[in-house]
């Protein structure tokens, strides 16, 4: 039986959606970062079709709050909901605070041949997530994506796509491994680009996700500089 969307979602559903959008995350990114939820559950939460404290269970709620950057107190303040679990908040681990590092968007990186201006601003990333990736906050640089060549033509791979308007964070503290997505300075065209990186003989090759777009091939002696591998992505046009 199909669920009928609510004409006016409850306040708690609107609050969850507003917090996700404030962080610049898509529903898919929230689900992936939680490691327990899926995109459908996030969508149903934001439409008021499932209840966060009655339907999710303790583990999924804890994961949701971690991704949204809410302590239990902030969750109850923003949504007006109280816990419906038998366990104490301390036993559930819901009182742990989430701390964020905030970075300016430094420049626009080219993903294709579009020339649409991309806005700047600030991006906040959970410090816990950076630590899990082995990334030091002082090595993070954030860029805005312009173009769609990193959007996969495979529907199954859409969650791995980097879309126009996304923000990406790179780790300048290490060199990328073959196959990783990187931001690089292409001195021949004097642009920052975002592509999948690989070294092939005397050449450095930058591959797009879209097969219809040709790769960028540069000789090792060309003025090319790898800024760093992409370790995080988010954006207002997702979800």
Image (spheres, grey):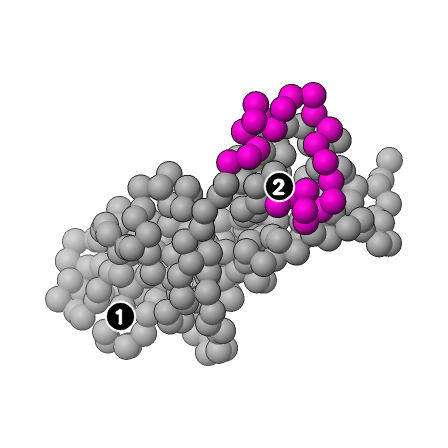
Q: Quadrant of the N terminus?
A: top right
Q: Is residue 120 visible?
A: yes
Q: Against 145, is 191 above or below?
A: below
Given residues 153 and 29, the one toward you in this image is: 29
Q: Which mark is residue 13?
A: none
Across and down, in percent, residue 129 comes to 42, 43
At label 2, counting other C-alpha atoms closer than 10 Å, the crowd grade (few under 14, some 14-19, many 20 or more) is few
Magenta residues, start to end: 73-96
Q: What residue do we see at 15% from left, 58% from top?
A: 202
Depth check, mark 1 against mark 2: the one in front is: 2
Q: Would you name the residue on which mark 2 appears?
A: 73
Across and down, in percent, residue 28 comes to 58, 47
Q: Is residue 54 left or right of residue 32?
A: right
Q: Is residue 71 left or right of residue 50?
A: left
Q: Would you name the residue on which mark 1 appears?
A: 186
Residue situated furthest left in the rendering: 221
Across and down, in percent, residue 118 comes to 48, 73
Label 1 to label 2, Cα distance in Å? 48 Å
Q: What residue do we see at 47% from left, 69% from top?
A: 121
Label 2: state its secondary structure: helix
Given residues 109 and 94, the one toward you in this image is: 94
Given residues 184 and 205, the one toward you in this image is: 184
């Amino acid at each position: 039986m199909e669920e009928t969307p609510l004409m006016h979602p409850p306040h708690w559903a609107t609050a969850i959606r507003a917090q996700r959008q404030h962080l610049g995350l898509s529903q898919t990114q929230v689900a992936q970062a939680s490691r327990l939820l899926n995109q459908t559950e996030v969508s149903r939460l934001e439409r008021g079709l499932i209840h966060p404290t009655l339907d999710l269970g303790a583990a999924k709620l804890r994961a949701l709050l971690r991704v949204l950057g809410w302590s239990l107190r902030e969750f109850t303040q923003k949504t007006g909901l109280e816990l419906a679990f038998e366990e104490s908040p301390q036993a559930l681990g819901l009182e742990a605070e989430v701390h964020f590092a905030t970075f300016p968007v430094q420049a626009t990186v080219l993903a294709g041949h579009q020339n649409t201006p991309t806005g700047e601003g600030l991006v906040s990333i959970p410090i816990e997530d950076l630590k899990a990736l082995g990334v030091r906050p002082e090595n993070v640089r954030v860029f805005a994506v312009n173009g769609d060549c990193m959007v996969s033509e495979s529907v199954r791979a859409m969650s791995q796509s980097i879309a126009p308007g996304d923000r990406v964070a790179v780790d300048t503290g290490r060199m990328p491994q073959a196959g990783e997505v990187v931001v690089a300075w292409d001195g021949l065209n004097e642009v920052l680009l975002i592509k999948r990186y690989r070294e092939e003989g005397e050449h450095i090759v930058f591959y797009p996700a879209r097969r219809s777009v040709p790769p960028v091939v540069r000789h090792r002696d060309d003025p090319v500089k790898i800024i760093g591998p992409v370790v995080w992505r988010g954006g207002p046009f997702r979800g």
